[in-house]
Image: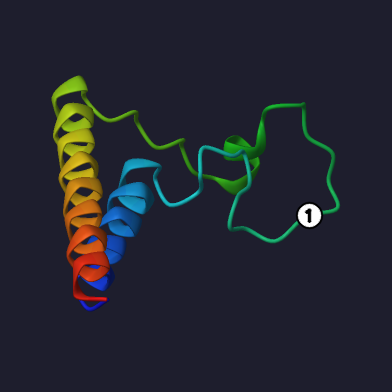
Amino acid sequence: MSALLPAALLAAAVLVTGCGGNGGSDHSAAPASSTATAPGDSAAAAGTSPAPAPAPSELAHMQKLVDEADSAAATADSDAAGDK
């Protein structure tokens, strides 16, 4: 069980940093304003620019980390099943 926590934390950290912390959605952290904006113009309304997409090499590295975390979790599950 204790081996699952670091793997889960690593996977969560990878997902948060890989997705820019917003899950790829168009939600902004700024409060809603009463002025109307054009559809898809939330970044301009908030006064910020959208986060750039990660480079392919960064995506490959993040996928490797997720795969390693999955493998570690599977190994931990297997070890735990053997201890029963």
- Amino acid type, residue under disc 1 in the picture: Ser
Tell me the colour scheme of the image: rainbow
Image quarter for residue 57?
A: top left
Say which residue label 1 marks: 33
Q: Position of residue 37 (x, y in %)?
A: 78, 34
* Quadrant assignment for the N terminus: bottom left
Q: Position of residue 33 (x, y in %)?
A: 78, 54
Q: Front-most of 75 and 10?
A: 75
For disc 1, the neighbor class at 10 Å (few under 14, some 14 to 19, many from 20) is few
Q: Report the residue at 34% width, 31% height from top.
A: 52
Q: Is residue 49 above or below residue 34?
A: above
Name, please, the residue furthest toward the top. 56
> How many numbered marks does the figure carry?
1
Image quarter for residue 45?
A: top right
* Residue 40 located left or right of residue 36: left
* Residue 7 located left or right of residue 51: left
Helix, strand or loop under label 1:
loop
Q: Is residue 20 above or below residue 6?
A: above
Q: Front-most of 74 and 31?
A: 74
Q: Report the residue at 29% width, 58% height from top.
A: 13
Q: Position of residue 32 (x, y in %)?
A: 76, 56
Q: Report the residue at 26% width, 61% height from top.
A: 77
Q: Is residue 24 above or below residue 70?
A: above
Q: Position of residue 53 (x, y in %)?
A: 34, 28
* Residue 66 located left or right of residue 18: left
* Quadrant assignment for the C terminus: bottom left
Q: Report the residue at 20% width, 51% height from top.
A: 69
